[in-house]
Amino acid sequence: MTQKTSTYENVTRQFDKAADLMGLDPEIRKILSKTTNEVRVNFPVKMDDGHIEILTGYRVQHNNALGPYKGGLRFHPAVDIDEVRALATWMTWKSAIVDIPFGGAKGGIQIDPANFSARELERITRRFTFALGCVIGPEYDIPAPDVNTNPQIMAWILDSYLAMMPPQERNRSLHVVTGKPVESGGSVGRDKATGQGIVFCIEQWAKDRGFDLKGATYAVQGFGNVGSWTARLLKPHGARLVAVEDVSGAYSNPEGLDPDDVCAYTRANRGRIAGYPHATPTDHETFMSTAADILIPAAMENQITAQTAPLLNVKLVVEGANGPTDPDGDAILAGRGIELLPDVLCNAGGVMVSYFEWLQNKRSESWDLEEVDTKLYKKMVNAYERVRDTVRAYNTDWRTAAYIVALNRLARVYKERGIFP
Ligand code: NAD
C-alpha cells in the first residue's frame, strides 16, 4: 500500500538541510520549525436545493516576524492541515527571500468547486469568511487567490469582511485581501504577476548561462493562472511550448502549441484542455518525459518525485507551483545535472504584486502597469541575484540557497528584537 506523501515533511527536510548547512542558531531553528496558529473551521452552507452542507476550511499562520501573515486560499479536495501547514511555511520563506514585509500563511476549503453552482460558491466563500472572522484582517492576515480561487472570490471575501466591520472602518479595510478585481481595489498586473516573475527569473538564468530563449522548448504542467501566464509571457521570447498537461489530460506538439490559442480554448472549455484540437493527446508518463529545454510544473505539489524525476528530459525545472518537487526528486535531479529554480524564489511575483496592491489600497493610490512591472522586475532580479550569490557562496543548490537567504533574514530579526518577555 502506498503511503500519502506528507507535504509538510518535505518542508521540514528542506528546512533541515539549509539550517544544517548554514549553522542556524538552534533557538531560531526551534521557533521557525513550528507554525504559530492553526485554525480549522466547520461551517454550514445552504445549497441551491435548500439542504445544508457542513464544510471544512483552514487558515494556518506560520510566522509574522517580518510583517502581517500573507498567503493564498485554495479550494480543492486535497486541502488538509498538512498541505496548508506546508504552504503557509513556504510563504514565510518566500516573502523573506524577495524582501517584502510579510509573514507566511495559507488557507483553503476542502471542496471540488466543480461540484457547486456559482451561487453556491459565493455562499461558501461568504460563510468561510464569516467563520474566519478576525482570524484575517488588513494589518494582520491577508488572503489572496490560489488554486481554484480567483478575483471574483476575493471580491466576495472583501464584501463579506467589510459587512462585518463598523461602517466607519470599511473604507480603511480594502487591503484585507489581495488579487481583487481592479475595479474593486485590485492592482493592474496582479493577474499575470506570478507568471511574469517566473519569466523574469528564466530571463536571468538564460543570461547567466548564455542560453538563447529564442527557439528554446518547454513544457508546462497546469494551465491555470500561473501556467497560462508563464506560457503567454514566454511567447514573445520566441520559446516554443511543446507539451501541456492539466487535470483533464496531456497534449503535445513538437511543432509548438500557441499559448494564446490554448488559453482561448481552455477558457471556453471550463478551464480544461481536454479535446484540444491542435495537439496530440498523450499520457502523464509521456508528458513527464517530454524532451525539452525547460519543464515548468505549475499545478500541484509532489509531481517530481523518486518515481518521476528519472523520466525528466530537460535542462532546467522552473517551479511555478508550490512544492512540485519533493526532496527525493530534488536529489535525483541534482544527480542527473538538471538545474532547478525553486518555488520560493521564482513564483514570488504573485505575492510581490499582492504587496503592491496592499500598499496602493493603504495609500488610496492606483499605479499603472509600467510602474507595477518596473518595481516587480527590480525586486525579482534582486532576489534572483541574492539567491544566485548564495548558491556560489555555499556551493549548494538553488532551493537550499533560497532557504539560507530567508533564514538569515528571519534570524537577524529575532536576534535584534529578542523574545518577549
Ligand atoms: P489555477 O487553479 O489557476 O490552475 C491550476 C492548474 O493546475 C489547472 O490548469 C488545473 O487543471 C491544473 N491541475 C490541477 N491538478 C492537476 C494535476 N493533478 N495534474 C496536472 N494538472 C493539474 O491555480 P494557480 O493559481 O495557477 O496555481 C497553480 C500553482 O501555483 C499552485 O501550486 C499555487 O499554489 C501556485 N502559485 C499560485 C500563485 C498565484 O498567484 N495564483 C502564486 C504563487 C504560486
Image (spheres, rainbow, N blue to C red):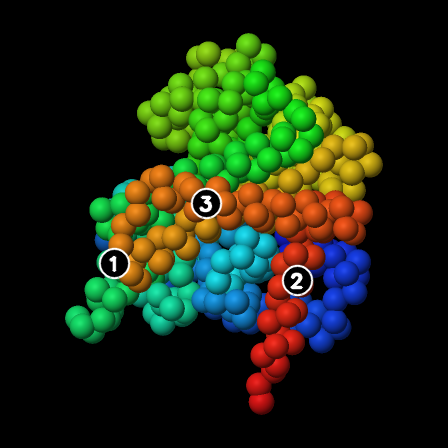
In the depicted structure, whether residue 3 falls above or below residue 174? above
Q: Is residue 329 visible?
A: yes
Query: Mark 2 — residue?
Result: 407
User: Quadrant location of residue 296?
Assistant: top right
Callout 1 secondary element: loop
According to the picture, the residue beneath numbered tag 1 turns out to be: 364
Nearest to N terminus: mark 2 or mark 3: 3
Disc 2 versus disc 3: distance between alpha carbons? 22 Å
- The residues tagged by marks 3 and 1 sit, at their Cα atoms, a distance apart of 20 Å
Image-based side of 167 in relation to 124, left or right: left
Q: Amino acid at mark 3?
A: Leu
Q: Position of residue 373 (x, y in %)?
A: 41, 41
Determine if the C-beta at disc 2 is less than 8 A from ligand 1.
Answer: no
Is 130 situated left or right of 348 in this image?
A: left
Residue found 60% across the figure and 35% down from its top: 204
Mark 3 and mark 1 in contact? Answer it, CB < 8 Å.
Answer: no
Mark 1: which amino acid? Ser
Q: Is residue 363 left or right of residue 220?
A: left
Per the rendering, the mark at residue 86 is none
